[in-house]
Image: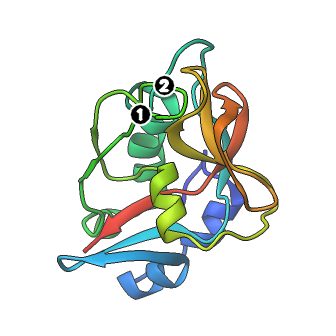
Amino acid sequence: YIRKNVSQNAQESFKNTKSLNELIADCIVLNKQNGKIMLISKDILIHKPYNKNTGEITWECSTLRNWLNSIFYMEAFEKKERVWISRSSIANNDNLVYDTPAGENTVDRIFLLSSDEATEMLPLKEASDWWWLRSPGMDAQNVARVSINGTFVLYRGALAVRSGGVRPVMWVS
């Protein structure tokens, strides 16, 4: 079940999950490979800044990445559910249009989509608010996002200290 510090939407999405099939029902299946399924939450679960501090930032060093893989992971899922969530190698690609570095690749249980993954895997639709991607924007202080009308804002993005929607992604087995 969900404990404190996780939004009401997250609670509604995950609190009564008893099986992997129920978890999958609360998410969108993005990919299947090697006996694993890549899932993204159907909706924004919480609003958080990508990073608490101003300045240059990458996914690897962001406070949002840390929160997703620690507090969210531990509070959104019971122990029996956490065993389904795989540690995954996450490729972080530079923004080639503006030559903005993405930082090092990471290993995460919970992550955000990159701009490439969102373009390839997710049918975009209007949402209640904009939400973060993990890819860099036009400079190292901006991060790519999906706008409220469902279009990608890949280059300018949003300042990392703004509070944006979070749609967690995970590989489950």
141 vs 134: above or below:
above
Q: Which colour scheme is used?
A: rainbow
The amino acid on which the numbered mark 1 sits, given as a three-letter code, is Asp
Q: Identify the residue under disc 1.
A: 94
In this view, the residue farthest toward the front is: 97
- At which x and y percent is residue 26? 55, 78
- Please determine whether, in this image, residue 25 is positioned above or below residue 102: below
Q: How crowded is mark 1: few (under 14 residues within 10 Å), some or many (20 or more)?
A: some
Q: Distance between the Cα atoms at labels 2 and 1?
A: 6 Å
Q: Do the residues labelled 2 and 1 touch (CB within 8 Å)?
A: yes
Q: Which residue is drawn at 52% across and 36% down?
A: 64
Q: Which residue sits at x=36%, y=81%?
A: 20
**Image height check: is 155 above or below 83?**
above
The x and y percentages for residue 19 are 38, 84
Question: Which residue has dot 2 on it?
Answer: 100
Q: Which of marks 2 and 1 is nearer the N terminus?
A: 1
Residue type at numbered disc 2: Thr
